[in-house]
Image (cartoon, rainbow, N blue to C red):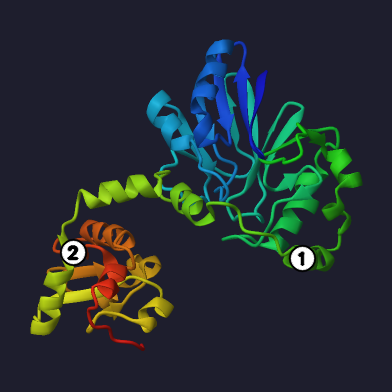
Amino acid sequence: MLFEQIATGGCQSYLVGCAKTCVAALIDPENSQIDRYQALASQHGLRIRYAIDTHTHADHFSATRRLAEQLGAKTVMHRRSAYPGVDLRVDDGELIAVGELRLRVLYTPGHTSDSMCLIVEDRVFTGDTLLIGGTGRTDLPSGDPEALHDSLFNRLLKLDPALKVYPAHDYKGRSHSTLGTEIADNPRLQKREREAFVTMMRELNLGMPTHLTEALRTNMSGGRTVAEMLAEAAASVSFMSLEELRRQVEEQPGDLVILDVREREAYVAGHVHGARLLPRGQLELRVNDELPDPTQRVLAVCEFGRISTLAAATLHEMGFRRAIALDGGMKAWREAGYPLDTGA
């Protein structure tokens, strides 16, 4: 087995290759390191066949999509992943063939619902399920402390204690540990009883990762950054000016639906007269009930004009071909001194 560990701040990714067949996999690749991955693969004479994420990351941007595009690699995640661009969805106990190497999947939900570990030869890649001296947090989207307890104590920690532990993160410059060392010394693993462990996890009160919202949205939406999605959306929709919207509101045309896609608090604080509230995060779930006629002209409105652009593009994809966005958003509307309604 050919092996390289690549650190990006506290993030750890791994190049695992078969020396005989020159086939390799990248585990938890980070977006800023693509050139380095390619250089290391070339140095060893390897062809990267798989780009694997052990879970949906909330603290960095995954490189799996770009690796797939640039190298023809196949993206791999657990079948529970919400990421739409997965080429190979794997399940517990299945094997990923990397030449003559076999990476065995161990499903370990808890940090996220799609978390998995990968076992190959003398080591286990634990993602954010088990860290050196810690565990993955459970307070982010799809986290579950009870599931993590089960994954750790009933699954992962029952493996050979000699297995080397290679996590997706380490912020103290350590390269690896072993399961036996973690069982003996990891403070979080000393809370072996379910109730005590769950209480501990719920009381950690950790700070939120940098870029949390953007990283989650990017890694769950096909690997595109917000900037990429916005540029793509802006090219596919048209816009209404503030002045035109004011004229339309004053004349009260019957064919224009003003859809405020901000959160309720922002809407209540001040919105355009006649606007309906439908937060962007609920758009796909509620649009058929809220807008039964796809031939209507729909104007999406948000705070700065960015989220409404994405919402209008989404509406286009759902058949609302007359959906447009407000140029400038509510911030510009307020600055222009135009009238606002308040309340629900």
Say which quarter of the image contains residue 45.
top right
Element type where label 2 sits in the image: loop
Regarding residue 296, the answer to whether it shows in the image is no
- Per the image, the residue denoted by label 2 is 323
Q: Quadrant of residue 312?
A: bottom left
Q: Which mark is residue 319?
A: none
Badge 1: few (under 14), some or many (20 or more) residues near its Cα, within 10 Å?
Answer: some
The type of residue carrying mark 1 is Val
Q: Residue furthest right?
A: 184
Residue at 52% x, 52% y is 211
Under tag 1, what secondary structure? helix
* Vertical comparison of 189 with 160: above or below: below
Residue 189 makes an appearance in the image: yes
Reply above or below: 319 against 50. Answer: below
Left/right of residue 55 with respect to residue 147 in the rendered view? left
Which percent across, then down, holds residue 152?
76, 51
Question: Left or right of 300: which side holds 154?
Answer: right
Question: How many numbered marks, from 0 up?
Answer: 2
- Asked whether 232 or 3 is in front, the reply is 232
Question: Seen in the image, is 324 located left or right of residue 36?
Answer: left
Which corner quadrant holds the C terminus? bottom left
Residue located 51% across and 33% down the image: 32
Q: In the drawing, what numbered circle is on residue 198?
A: 1
The quadrant in which residue 303 appears is: bottom left
What residue is rendered at 25% in x and 80% in y?
272
209 shown above or below 273 = above
**Amino acid at circle 2:** Ala
Comparing marks 1 and 2, which lies closer to the viewer?
Answer: 2
